[in-house]
Image (tube, rainbow, N blue to C red):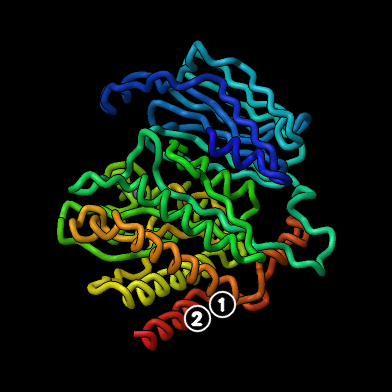
């Protein structure tokens, strides 16, 4: 939470309140087979509140079956979670009062149903996402754009806002190398170096989801990016494989996949089993969310483009100083940390920490600096490649549908980049 406090403490940044109805003291350790026979525990409800965006997270002991409904007079959204019970310690009402959401209420509606009610105020739209391990029902609520998010003078170009997300942290070390190098430490150092480099550009504002060794839930990282009204979100990770020989650099954007290796990477980063990961690719609500997310503002095209620029820059740049840099390319998979991100967003796997040689490289300041410089190079190429789509968007009412005059189809974007890759080799 220190990271959040720091970021919230910066001038002109939205104030963040984190309130939890109750701390999750312990989650059920019984097996799924056992929980299937018992009621689903509603163990925690919390929210992250920003001027024009709120993320509500309901933590459950098992996958919920639920119905949802929105009622008027007064405006409210409710969820009836079947075969469930509410923890006694939970308060029944959680006041929010941020202009979008008056409060969140939860109660045992009948013997087998917990009802969670969101008392709405001025809400532009909402979205529901589910995540596993622990199982969370996530509701994203969008209000009207805040004054801070819109420019009073469209002639003055706003700065590009980039949120860098060093993966893992705190009690979550991420992948651990054969010589005990921790992914969380490597990616934090790269992110700090990247911030330093990008901050030299007066047209760029950089935020980190964490700037120290603390744990931040995946859903909070996306919430931070959305709250900053960021133009780009770049999550940084180090790869791992049971195959010691596995090596190379790859960059992901959010999309379905049936690629086994990509699903393994996403399963590890999502901290769920490969089996659950494959199931995730088939879940209807996830499909709907992603379909809606990707169609908005050509986000998939833009994320693919960003991924290509970063991947190309990393491979070309590192190849100058290091031998045997392996280009694993741009890939797609369902990463929780990219769910619900409103901007072009990618996840970079900088090298394999499980490979003894790459672990050795990752342990050096030079290699990390090279990675940071090349990621910054990719970001800069992307930013200068097209008119500032998100900036135009920010200067318009977010009620209007945003069009990108030079948006490209997925095929055109990837075709152009492939050519660039080919000529660069
Ligand atoms: Zn990771």
Task: Please say if the residues under marks 1 and 2 sit with CB atoms less than 8 Å apart.
Answer: yes
- Residue that label 2 marks: 412
Q: Residues within 10 Å of mark 1 (few under 14, many from 20)?
A: some
Q: Position of residue 209 (x, y in %)?
A: 52, 46
Observer-nearest of 197 and 412 = 197
Observer-nearest of 17 and 261 = 17
Please tell me whether residue 256 is drawn above or below residue 65 in the rendered image: below
Q: Quadrant of the C terminus?
A: bottom left
Residue at point 47%, 25% (across, down): 82
Observer-nearest of 304 and 151 = 151
Q: Give the CA separation, mark 1 to mark 2.
A: 6 Å
**In the drawing, what numbered circle is on residue 155?**
none
Residue at point 21%, 53% (across, down): 354
The extreme right residue here reads 153
Residue at point 39%, 38% (across, down): 132
Please tell me whether residue 384 is drawn above or below residue 58 in the rendered image: below
Residue at point 49%, 74% (across, down): 410
**In the structure shown, which secondary structural element does the residue marked by tag 1 occupy?**
loop
Q: Position of residue 161 (x, y in %)?
A: 62, 58
- Residue that label 1 marks: 408
**Is residue 261 at all visible to an observer of this figure?**
no
């Amino acid at each position: 939470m220190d990271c959040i406090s720091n970021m919230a403490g910066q001038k002109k940044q939205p104030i963040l309140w984190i309130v939890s109805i109750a701390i999750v003291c312990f989650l059920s350790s019984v097996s799924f087979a056992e929980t299937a026979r018992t009621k689903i525990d509603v163990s925690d409800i919390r929210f992250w509140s920003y001027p024009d965006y709120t993320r509500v997270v309901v933590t459950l002991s098992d996958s919920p079956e639920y119905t949802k409904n929105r009622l008027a007079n007064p405006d409210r959204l409710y969820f009836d979670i079947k075969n469930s019970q509410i923890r006694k310690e939970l308060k029944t009402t959680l006041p929010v009062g941020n202009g979008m959401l008056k409060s969140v209420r939860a109660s045992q509606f009948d013997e087998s149903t917990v009802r969670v009610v969101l008392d709405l105020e001025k809400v532009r739209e909402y979205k529901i996402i589910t995540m596993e391990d622990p199982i969370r029902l996530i509701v994203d609520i969008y209000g009207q754009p805040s004054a801070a998010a819109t420019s009073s003078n469209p002639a003055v170009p706003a700065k590009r806002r980039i949120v860098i997300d060093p993966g893992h942290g705190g009690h979550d070390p991420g992948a651990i190398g054969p010589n005990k190098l921790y992914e969380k430490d490597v990616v934090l150092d790269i992110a700090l170096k990247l911030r330093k480099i990008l901050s030299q550009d007066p047209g760029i504002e950089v935020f980190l989801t964490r700037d120290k060794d603390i744990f931040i839930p995946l859903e909070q990282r996306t919430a931070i990016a959305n709250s900053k009204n960021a133009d780009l979100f770049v999550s940084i990770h180090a790869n791992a494989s049971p195959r010691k020989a596995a090596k190379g650099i790859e960059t992901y954007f959010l999309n379905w996949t049936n690629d086994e290796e990509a699903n393994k990477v996403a399963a590890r980063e999502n901290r769920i089993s490969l089996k659950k990961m494959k199931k995730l690719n088939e879940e209807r609500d996830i499909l709907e969310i992603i379909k809606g997310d990707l169609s908005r503002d050509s986000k998939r095209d833009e994320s693919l483009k960003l991924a290509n620029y970063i991947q190309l820059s990393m491979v070309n740049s590192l190849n100058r100083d290091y031998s045997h840099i392996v280009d694993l390319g741009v890939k797609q998979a369902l990463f929780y940390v990219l769910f619900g991100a409103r901007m072009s967003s990618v996840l970079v796997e900088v090298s394999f920490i499980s490979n003894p040689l790459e672990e050795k490289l990752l342990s050096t300041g030079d290699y990390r600096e090279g990675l940071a410089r090349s990621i910054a190079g990719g970001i800069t190429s992307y930013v200068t490649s097209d008119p500032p789509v998100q900036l135009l968007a920010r200067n318009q009412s977010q009620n209007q549908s945003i069009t990108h005059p030079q948006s490209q189809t997925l095929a055109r974007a990837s075709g152009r980049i492939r050519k660039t890759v080919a000529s660069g080799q």
